[in-house]
Image (tube, rainbow, N blue to C red):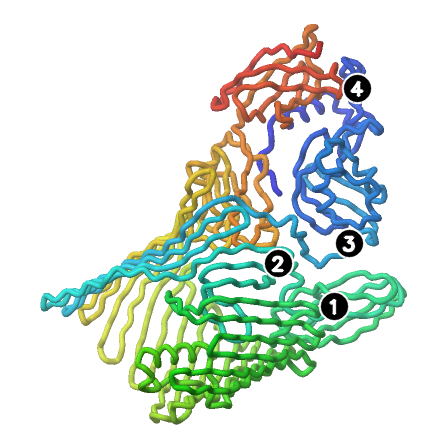
């Protein structure tokens, strides 16, 4: 959390204290004699004798336990009569965030009880330090009293449902082409929208299209307006399932086996619900320390983890998944300086899971393809389980009335690379042909990284060894064809027989990067084998980037051989601009292209491209494009023409419309989860968390993407808001659920300077250092010398304020007020503050 606008009343108050007695700053005790010995009406200045003194009230703070961030929360300070100062209250919310063992908590707060349980009494073995300037609350506690959680762990109770809202993403593209023979126009509108109600999210996607063709002979072909429905489903997550439930039209998301569309019900795990350090694959490290020891884990020469462990066995199971392969070196440095080490094999190139982790999907319903739903009912189950550091088991089952399939496989992590293999058995029935087919498919792969020399080698072999192996889509498609044509013939489909792939990437240091790949495949229903090779090299010479790509494809059935070469150059032209050139040759065709592209604007909100190309047949073409991004969407336009008198024009716009309780907001296209920002009276302020996003006239904006189940920082830069707008904070934290729409309210106030000259019924001024609150308990301002209340925290134009210089009724007074919050000028009011009778 960050605060960038500082209230003037607190600055004035601090200056008053300093100017009153410059020597008081160096004293150990606050000199209360400046205000009559502090005895005036019982005012207590003792709190100013305490380092980092905090006034009673509610604050926002970042919470840390032993320097580990836990998140953001409201905290409460209340006066403790036993110590004579304001102390932290141990609330149920704070207890949940600290995540401590039961032995650490001596006294727990009761939910719904307004009585303050002081943190110093609740956790006597802990040391709390509130740093008001940085708005941080730090707790230091013996490690044995903290619950060891994976790094990045967030309790499910802190996941935020978000607000009720509706949205619609749109992508509109208009295209027109003209040539001497035909003029064509087409319109495409892509839609993705939804409604959020509580924990449930309704989603739909689809597209609308139409076209018109006008020939030079006068013939006109007008296509029909066509809307194609995609997925439409209702979804919510369940922490207990560590996954989500989906009902409606959706696409299965299995990582192994076959995926397809269906209308029905799906229950599936969601790895994003895990702590970031538990996602993906990383091995569990086990060892034994002889003394209190420092354990360091290194990969490819870099330290990726370090922790201090007590004597005895230790387990490290929260390593972050690495984007690179490479064995882990574990070093144990004992307290006497002796170091031991051992190796843990690690490769992330196979379908591996952490020890004890489970990934699943269970789905049932009617089979769908495109926007059509068929009568065939399908049941699918998928299960992956991390059995050991080295072995992950994979399985799936698929069942319909006329089709069954089962898959079993494994991923293996070894010192010499990563292996994976699986076997699929299928049983397909064709009732109209009165036949059934049993087949199987085998798949195996091997991958290894040689990090010392920068080599990555991947081998993948696919072999469909049975002529009678059919997939679910094959079977359903054939049965429908047999039904349509009464089984008169067997349509020709190409089913893979053998496939082999190999890829190799090699870093050459300052000499660039080399990439080589090849594949060969054939089909049961076709003669011959198709083979493809590709060789690519990329490097830079000073500021010039260049690459070359060679490829060859061979079709043994037709004897056709296609060789091609592609060369590209890119030269920077200052910041964010470059000139590009390319040369390509395929067979006897040669093409050359030259272009300039880049971006400009304060936040690079504009981008452009200009290109010219020609070939060896004398053909020439020219094109230009321009795009702009802002808070409410993106806009694009392009134009091209060539030497054959062909011309084309396209216009496009994409964005989103979001309806929420603060109004309707136009936005850039939004993702699965997104956030709405509201900051009253702060139009024009830039959003730190979104590219080229600013608050609109109503103080609303949309952050188009957020990461579910993680802490997201949503920030505002107030520099472009009106000068008299004050932000209570300029950064907030949210922890959204998947598919959630978060509403982030930044509390603001017009920095209207209102001075109340307060006197008591006896004519004396209200004591200096008194604090004022509104009827809801929100802080309004401080009283400085002469009974002057600087009230620039007013949120209502009229109401009642309560002024306190102690906790007893006799140490408080109240008064009614009415001011003009839209007046930027200083307002001065003489008020008599009434005390209790």
Spatial CA span between label 1 and label 3: 22 Å
Q: Nearer the viewer, mark 4 or mark 3?
A: 3
Q: Nearer the viewer, residue 829 or 4?
A: 829
Which quarter shows the C terminus?
Answer: top right
Residue 649 can be seen, yes or no: no
Spatial CA span between label 4 and label 2: 55 Å
| Residue holding disc 4 | 32
| Residue holding disc 1 | 297
**Secondary element at image label 4:** helix
Q: Nearer the viewer, residue 410 or 326?
A: 410
* x, y percent for residue 84: 82, 27
**Secondary element at image label 1:** strand
Q: Is residue 289 above or below residue 608?
A: below
Tell me which numbered mark, 2 or 1, is placed earlier along the sequence: 2
Farthest residue to the top: give it: 762
Spatial CA span between label 4 and label 3: 45 Å
Residue 53 can be seen, yes or no: yes
* x, y percent for residue 248: 46, 59
Q: Nearer the viewer, mark 1 or mark 4?
A: 1
Q: Is residue 762 above or below residue 172?
A: above
**Residue 378 as seen in the image, left or right of residue 394:** left
Tell me which numbered mark, 4 or 2, is placed earlier along the sequence: 4
Q: Do labels 4 and 2 touch, CB within 8 Å? A: no
Spatial CA span between label 1 and label 4: 57 Å
| Residue holding disc 2 | 273
Total marks in image: 4
Q: Which mark is residue 147?
A: 3
Tell me which numbered mark, 2 or 3, is placed earlier along the sequence: 3
Farthest residue to the left: give it: 217
Q: Residues within 10 Å of mark 2 (few under 14, many from 20)?
A: many
Which quarter shows the N terminus?
Answer: top right
């Amino acid at each position: 959390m960050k605060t960038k606008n500082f209230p003037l009343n607190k600055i004035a108050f601090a200056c008053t204290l300093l100017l009153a007695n410059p020597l008081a700053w160096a004293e150990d005790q606050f000199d209360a004699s400046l205000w009559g010995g502090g005895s005036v009406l019982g005012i207590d200045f003792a709190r100013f004798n305490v380092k980092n003194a905090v006034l009673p009230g509610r604050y926002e703070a970042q919470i840390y336990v032993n320097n580990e961030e836990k998140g953001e929360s409201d905290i409460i300070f209340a006066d403790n009569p036993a110590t004579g100062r304001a102390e932290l209250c141990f609330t149920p919310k704070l207890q949940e965030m600290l995540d401590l063992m039961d032995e650490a908590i001596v006294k727990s707060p009761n939910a719904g009880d307004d009585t303050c349980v002081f943190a110093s009494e609740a956790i006597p073995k802990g040391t709390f330090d509130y740093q008001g300037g940085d708005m941080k609350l730090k707790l230091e506690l013996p490690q044995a009293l903290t619950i060891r959680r994976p790094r990045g762990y967030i309790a499910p109770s802190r996941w935020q449902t978000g607000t009720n809202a509706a949205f619609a993403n749109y992508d509109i593209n208009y295209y027109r082409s003209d040539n001497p023979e035909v003029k064509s126009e087409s319109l495409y509108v892509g839609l993705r929208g939804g409604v959020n109600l509580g924990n449930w999210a309704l989603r739909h996607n689809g597209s609308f299209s139409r076209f018109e063709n006008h020939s030079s002979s006068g013939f006109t072909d007008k296509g029909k307006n066509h809307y194609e429905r995609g997925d439409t489903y209702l979804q919510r997550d369940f922490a207990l399932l560590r996954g989500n439930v989906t009902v409606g039209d959706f696409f299965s998301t299995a990582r192994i086996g076959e995926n397809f569309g269906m209308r029905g019900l799906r229950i599936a795990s969601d790895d994003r619900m895990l702590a970031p350090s538990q996602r993906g694959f990383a091995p569990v490290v086990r060892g034994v320390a002889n003394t209190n020891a420092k354990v360091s884990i290194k990969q490819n020469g870099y330290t990726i983890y370090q922790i201090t462990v007590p004597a005895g066995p230790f387990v490290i199971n929260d390593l972050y998944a690495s984007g690179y392969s490479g064995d882990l070196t574990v070093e144990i440095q004992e307290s006497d300086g002796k170091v031991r080490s051992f190796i843990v094999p690690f490769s992330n190139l196979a379908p591996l899971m952490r020890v004890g982790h489970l990934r699943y999907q269970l789905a049932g319903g009617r089979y769908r393809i495109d926007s059509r739903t068929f009568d065939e009912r399908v049941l699918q189950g998928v299960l992956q389980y991390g059995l050991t550091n080295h072995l992950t088991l994979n399985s799936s089952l698929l069942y319909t009335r006329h089709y069954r399939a089962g898959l079993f496989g494994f991923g293996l992590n070894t010192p010499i690379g990563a292996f994976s293999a699986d076997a699929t058995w299928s049983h397909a029935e064709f009732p109209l042909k009165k036949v059934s087919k049993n087949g199987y498919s085998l798949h195996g792969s091997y991958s290894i990284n040689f990090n010392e020399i920068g080599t990555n080698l991947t081998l993948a072999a696919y072999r469909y060894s049975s002529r009678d192996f059919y997939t679910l889509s094959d079977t359903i498609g054939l049965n429908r064809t047999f039904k349509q044509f009464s089984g008169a013939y067997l349509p020709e489909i190409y089913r893979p027989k053998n496939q082999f792939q190999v890829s190799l990437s090699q870093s050459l240091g300052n000499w660039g990067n080399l990439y080589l790949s090849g594949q060969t495949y054939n089909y049961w229903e076709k003669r011959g084998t198709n083979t493809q090779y590709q060789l690519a090299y990329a490097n830079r010479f000073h500021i010039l980037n260049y690459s070359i790509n060679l490829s060859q494809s061979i079709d043994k059935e037709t004897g056709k051989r296609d060789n091609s070469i592609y060369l590209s150059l890119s030269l920077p032209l200052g910041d964010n601009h470059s000139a590009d050139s390319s040369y390509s040759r395929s067979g006897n065709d040669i093409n050359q292209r030259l272009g300039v592209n880049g971006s400009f604007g304060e936040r690079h909100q504009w981008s452009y491209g200009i290109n010219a190309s020609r070939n060896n047949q004398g053909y020439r073409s020219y094109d230009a494009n321009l795009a702009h991004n802002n808070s409410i969407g993106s806009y694009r336009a392009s134009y091209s023409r060539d030497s054959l008198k062909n011309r084309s024009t396209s216009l496009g716009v994409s964005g989103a419309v979001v309806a929420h309780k603060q109004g309707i907001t136009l936005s850039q296209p939004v993702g699965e989860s997104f956030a709405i920002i509201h900051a009253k009276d702060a139009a024009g302020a830039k959003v730190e968390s979104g590219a080229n996003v600013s608050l609109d006239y109503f103080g609303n904006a949309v952050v188009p993407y957020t990461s579910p189940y993680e802490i997201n920082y949503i920030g505002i830069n107030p520099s472009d808001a009106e000068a008299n707008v004050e932000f209570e904070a300029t950064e907030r934290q949210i922890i959204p659920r998947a598919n959630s729409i978060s509403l982030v309210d930044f509390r603001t106030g017009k920095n209207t300077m209102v001075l109340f000259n307060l006197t008591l019924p006896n004519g004396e001024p209200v004591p200096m250092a008194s604090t004022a609150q509104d009827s809801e308990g929100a802080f309004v301002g401080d009283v400085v010398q002469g009974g002057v209340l600087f009230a620039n925290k007013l949120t209502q134009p009229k109401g009642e304020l309560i002024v306190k210089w102690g906790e007893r009724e006799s140490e408080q007074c109240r008064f009614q007020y009415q001011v003009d919050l839209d007046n930027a000028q200083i307002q001065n009011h003489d008020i008599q503050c009434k005390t209790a009778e």
